[in-house]
Image (cartoon, grey):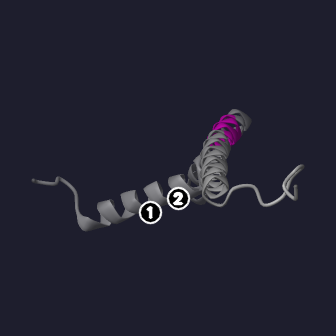
Amino acid sequence: KNLNCGSKIIQIAAYLAGGMFNDGYTFTLEIMNDMQLQIGLHCKQVADEYDKHRVDRQDRRTQSTSKEARTARKQELAAKMDEFAEEEGLLYGPGIAD
């Protein structure tokens, strides 16, 4: 492929992409501030709202994944207990000593 930009441009793009991934739009506002661009209140509100939604979305994904994992572990443990009960039989209970 032919690229119409130099390695500096690619480095800057990678830096921006990494910053956006880690910090969201707040990072973009920090870059704009470093470039001495005026950032209005509306820009800050939009960035904060977007970042809040991004974090909330990831929290929901994490919770659903961990809930699925907990459910799977519980089912696996229950299956092992049922298997053990079938192999060993009841070790205690009413009428066992009779």
Q: CA distance from mark 2 to mark 1?
A: 6 Å
Q: Residue at x 68, y 40 (%)?
A: 56
Q: Quadrant of residue 89?
A: bottom right
Magenta-drawn segment: 46-56
Report helix, strand or loop for mark 1. Answer: helix
Q: Is residue 94 visible?
A: yes
Q: Residue furthest front?
A: 98
Report helix, strand or loop for mark 2. Answer: helix
Question: Are the residues at dot 2 and dot 1 in contact (C-beta closer than 8 Å)?
Answer: yes
Q: Residues within 10 Å of mark 2 (few under 14, many from 20)?
A: some
- Residue 63 percent coordinates (x, y): 67, 45
Q: Quadrant of residue 77?
A: bottom right
In magenta stretch: residue 10 = no
- Residue 48 percent coordinates (x, y): 70, 41
Q: Which mark is residue 40?
A: none
- Residue 94 percent coordinates (x, y): 90, 49
Q: Residue at x 63, y 41 (%)?
A: 64
Main SS, magenta region, reads: helix
Q: How many marks?
A: 2
- Residue 25 percent coordinates (x, y): 59, 46
Location of the C terminus by quadrant is: bottom right
Q: Residue at x 59, y 52 (%)?
A: 76
Q: Which mark is residue 15?
A: 1
* Residue type, mark 2 in image: Gly
- Could you say which is closer to the camera, residue 82 or residue 20? 82
Q: Is residue 33 visible?
A: no
Q: Residues within 10 Å of mark 1 (few under 14, many from 20)?
A: few
- The residue identified by callout 2 is 19
* Residue type, mark 1 in image: Tyr
